Structures are given as structure tokens and as C-alpha cells.
């Protein structure tokens, strides 16, 4: 059963922030950074893992360094769910695939070598339904740190006009 956000305290939030910055950090160093003992921080991390808050650890790679010159977002129109899922699973160039609401049914993030490779991958999905493709020029933000949601942290950007 997932941990309730209300059960997470400031230490859990600090631990999550540090692990998202560097998942290879030692428990001793993590403890120093969040001002807890190594055994206490180790126990908290274990609980966050058991409760499914921390789903895993992974390396973030540079696509350019791996030979992928183009990253793109492909919007896929309405198509049979199972067919899209099967094609996504058979297409290693798909980095992320989200089933979404709105005009499109799917949004895919792909990494390809060049324009010819992009055409080959997009064509697979065009056979199913209409698509729209955008090439990613640069990223203003990627892999941002995510902390527990708190309603009290939401500040309205527009004040309501009351007519007074």
C-alpha cells in the first residue's frame, strides 16, 4: 500500500530530493546531508522503497553520446489500444509512451539516429493512425526533482475579481 503523503515528513522530502540528485550517494553521506544518522536514513530509504515511493534507481544517459542525434515527440491519434501497446513494445526507439486524453491517444518520446531513422520509426505508427511529430531542439528542464504534493504550497497566480 502506498505511503500517504501526510505520513512523509521533512526528512523524507530531503531524502527524496538528494536521491533524485544522486542515487549513488552513500547512506552515510545521505545521512550527513539530511542531518540524520546513517542507520536512521537507511531505514527511511528502505520504507520509501517498500511503500513504492521509490520505484527504482537508474542511470541518466546522454542520447547524443550514444549516437542518437534526434529526439522527437510523436503524437499518435486514436487507434486500437492493444495494437499501439504491441508496437511500442516492439520499437526500441520509444523511450517513453503515455496513453493520454484529448485529440491524441498517445504521446511518445523517441530517440533516433537521423532523419531517415525518424521516418522509419514514425512510419510504423502512421500505418495504425494519423501522427504528428515534433523534433526536440533542446530541453529547458529534464528529470526535475519531484517532492510530495502539498496543497498549501499551491499559490494562485490570478486573484478572483469579486466586484467590490
Image: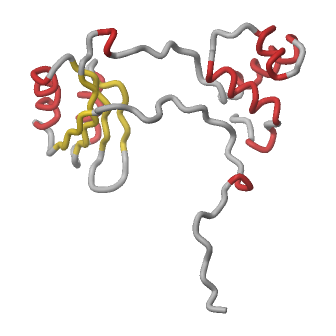
113 or 121: which is nearer to us? 113
What's the residue at 77%, 23% (across, down)? 47
Quadrant holding the C terminus: bottom right
What's the residue at 85%, 11% (across, down)? 38
Occupied quadrant, residue 54? top right
What's the residue at 81%, 39% (across, down)? 7
Q: How many marks?
A: 0
Occupied quadrant, residue 46? top right
Across and down, in percent, residue 110 comes to: 28, 27
- Taking the image as shown, residue 90 lies to the left or right of residue 54, namely left
Q: Is residue 90 among the parts visible in the rendering? A: no
Is the residue 61 above or below the residue 3 in the image?
A: above
Quadrant holding the N terminus: top right
Across and down, in percent, residue 71 comes to: 28, 27
105 or 34: which is nearer to us? 34
Q: Is residue 118 among the parts visible in the rendering? A: yes
150 or 162: which is nearer to us? 162
Is the residue 69 above or below the residue 2 in the image?
A: above
- Taking the image as shown, residue 34 lies to the left or right of residue 56, namely right
Across and down, in percent, residue 143 comes to: 51, 29
- Taking the image as shown, residue 97 lies to the left or right of residue 142, namely left
Q: Residue furthest bottom?
A: 164
Occupied quadrant, residue 154? bottom right
Across and down, in percent, residue 27 comes to: 77, 10
Is the residue 49 above or below the residue 99 in the image?
A: above
Q: How is the image coloured?
A: secondary structure
Amino acid at each position: 500500500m502506498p505511503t500517504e503523503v501526510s505520513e512523509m515528513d521533512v526528512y523524507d522530502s530531503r531524502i527524496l530530493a538528494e536521491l533524485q540528485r544522486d542515487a549513488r550517494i552513500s547512506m552515510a553521506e545521505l545521512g550527513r546531508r539530511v542531518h540524520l544518522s546513517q542507520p536512521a536514513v537507511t531505514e527511511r530509504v528502505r520504507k520509501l522503497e517498500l511503500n513504492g515511493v521509490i520505484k527504482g534507481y537508474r542511470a541518466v544517459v546522454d542520447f547524443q553520446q550514444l549516437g542518437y542525434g534526434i529526439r522527437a515527440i510523436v503524437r499518435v491519434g486514436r487507434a486500437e489500444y492493444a495494437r499501439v501497446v504491441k508496437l511500442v513494445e516492439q520499437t526500441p526507439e520509444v523511450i517513453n509512451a503515455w496513453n493520454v486524453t484529448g485529440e491524441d491517444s498517445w504521446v511518445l518520446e523517441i530517440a533516433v539516429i537521423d532523419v531517415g531513422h525518424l521516418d522509419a520509426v514514425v512510419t510504423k505508427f502512421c500505418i495504425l493512425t494519423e501522427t504528428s511529430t515534433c523534433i526536440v531542439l533542446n530541453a529547458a528542464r529534464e528529470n526535475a526533482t519531484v517532492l510530495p504534493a502539498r496543497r498549501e504550497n499551491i499559490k494562485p497566480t490570478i486573484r478572483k475579481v469579486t466586484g467590490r
